[in-house]
Amino acid sequence: MPAAPTPPPKKLNPLALPPYTAVFFALIALVILGAAFASFLPYSQIGWPLIVLPLTLLPLRDFLHGPDREKSSQHFRLPTPAEAPLQQAVNELSQQAGIHPPQVLINEDGSSLYAFGTFRRHFISVGANMAEILAEELQDKDLQTQKTARALLAHEIAHFANGDMQRAALARSMLKMTLLTALVSIWAAIGFVSVLVQIGPEITSPGFWDAAAATTGIPGLSLAWMPETMRAQNPHLFDLLANPAKAGDYWRFAIFYLANIFIPFLMAVPILYLFFWRKLMRVREYYADLRAASWLRDSQYVIQAMTLHRALTDVRPQPKSQGPLLPQRLLAFSWPASAGMLAYHPSPEDRKKALRSPLHLFGSPWRLAFWTGVAVLLLEIILRSSLTLIYVAQPAPYLPLLTATAVFGVWLLPRILAGESFRSLLKTGFQMALLFMLVKLSINFLDALFLGLAAGTGRLGALGHLVDAYLRSMLGGAGAESGPIFGGEFGWAQIVDWQIFRPIAYYLFFGIPLLTGVLAALIKLMQRALTWYRVERKMITVFWSVLLVLMGVQILLAYPLANILFFPMIYEWTWETTLRLALGLLLALIGALWFRQKHGQHAHRCPKCGEFIPDDFKLGQTCPHCHYPLHSWLIATYL
Ligand SMILES: [Zn+2]
Ligand SMILES: [Zn+2]
């Protein structure tokens, strides 16, 4: 008798877990909004409305107007009766998925299939050359052909159901508006400076204000005090403005100041766009495939749909694009966006691989650790500028550590649920922490390198002048004539101590052990919680609760102690420190008691028969007594 074929191993269902695209959205938002909201900090040198409002309201407006822009740049029409089955199939699939059905629009000069929209307005664009063929295939007598055509539409609908369409479009609007805000601000600021240079000698003379007061016609009004008030505000700047011969100095100061604020933004946007946003775009394709497969209950239709899509786009040579010129497109971020199944997409091989083993979509841990490091580094570089001068003196190191805790936690969760061993997970967690810290510290290593080179070549003096000019422009002074800050108030010993020695020591000897320890606790606790079979889907809530408590304990307990230990010149022990530590201990205690109580209540119990289940959880496991499938919500529902 031939042996019964062994069933294929069960696949994890990433759709039941926190969406991984949200991680890349969050990292983009962290850099942009983190920089914007830093302008609220007390030592920020820029007024917050100038930065917070443009970087929050403009992206939202751009995102909400997206569909209108798309409609005016493309030639859309409604489906003809022959193409009507497209909308019908979309309606059926959306109903099955329980979402509001997107509207099908036929793109007269497009040959692709893509989704666009906002939170509530959903559209699917179908290229005119493929619409009729696709409509015919949807009605084909052969079930295989019919389902393949449906899979193609299901993939597009899934982009809305997953929320990835919205995340990708909002992130893109955020990057676009940050770039435009930075460019417009530089342009406006240079205009403002040139006006100041032109009228400087006038407005700094008392005669000007007397004459101005006289023109108002108000008897007895005198404005002669104005120049003195201006001088009192910033004597050096006043001197530069009053003296036309010093206009060049003033220009140099202004350019230095503006470059410091805006160049980090101009540098961060392309990196975020090329690496973070495109990664989000690729990951969302895996999710759309997975959801389409689970709707059709079989991944083979989704795989065939990839081939069908390629065939459909080749039906007719694609018409030459009559769109705007490349520089305009670059500025407006309107190069072919959110395209069909192939552009900005992972390769079909990768997509098939992710359908077979969904853990593939989470990518390698090293890349994630590297890019998380890059994100916090970009934020730090932006914050080193005039936005928050305090950052020069205050390392505020908890933000990178908290970011890494959350991001790595979300990455590790599917592996924990898939049953990977503690040892192997911990090893990965440690390596991620190490790589992340090295990327984060690269700026401090660079500081050390510069300093070493300057010292070695005898140019420490020149570097000192540069540091001084930097500090002066950040503090709103100008030139180098009103006494050095650097060399006066502090010198090389402080720079080496604050920017090189202490941050490196902090991250290597405190950051890496702390991050690894927190990840170890998260892995261990989640592995234990995984035997709470009764909580089923609420396991995700358990995960967030455990993660939040661990982060809270980190904030209240670990950071204050480390700050006092590593940066005693900034932090000292006050009654607030004692209070925070007490709250941290209390939170840890409450968290531990809660976990113990839940563990006693739920651990190793079958949700159906209530009997004891001895082993650790494995994906696809059933109750040994009643054969009830354990954590069946974690298993992909397609073949
Ligand atoms: Zn897609
Ligand atoms: Zn049972």
Image: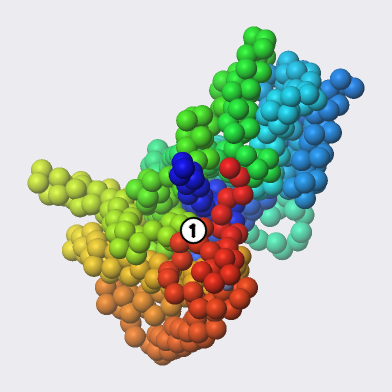
Q: Nearer the viewer, residue 134 or 26?
A: 134
Point 66% across, 18% down: residue: 312
In percent of width and height, residue 186 lies at 52, 40
Number of marks present in the image shown: 1
Q: Residues within 10 Å of mark 1 (few under 14, many from 20)?
A: some
The residue at label 1 has a CB less than 8 Å from ligand 2: no
Image quarter for residue 395?
A: bottom left
Q: Is residue 278 depicted above or below 149 in this figure?
A: below
- At horizontal 42% and vertical 86% (from top left) the residue drawn is 585
Which one is nearer the viewer's eye here, 28 or 496? 28
Q: Quadrant of residue 281?
A: top right
In the image, what residue occupies the spot 77% across and 50% down? 98
Image: 478 above or below 302: below
The three-letter code of the residue at mark 1 reads Leu
Q: Extreme right residue here?
A: 81
**Location of mark 1 (residue):** 619
Residue at left offset 51%, top offset 29%: 348
Q: Residue furthest top?
A: 317
Q: How is the image coloured?
A: rainbow
Hey, which quadrant is residue 421 in on the image?
bottom left
Can residue 612 be seen from the camera position used here?
A: yes
**Nearest to the observer: residue 537 or residue 220:** 537
Is 302 left, or right, of 361 in this rendering? Answer: right
The spot of residue 49 in percent (x, y) is 62, 56
Task: Look at the numbered disc 1 and give the secondary structure of its residue.
Answer: loop
Residue 241, given in percent of the width and then of the height, sits at: 47, 47
Q: Is residue 336 left or right of residue 491?
A: right
Q: Nearer the viewer, residue 122 or 294?
A: 294
Location of the C terminus (image quadrant): top right
What is the x, y in percent for residue 534? 59, 73
Q: Could one spot residue 477 in this view of the protein?
A: no
Extreme residue toward the front, this view = 1
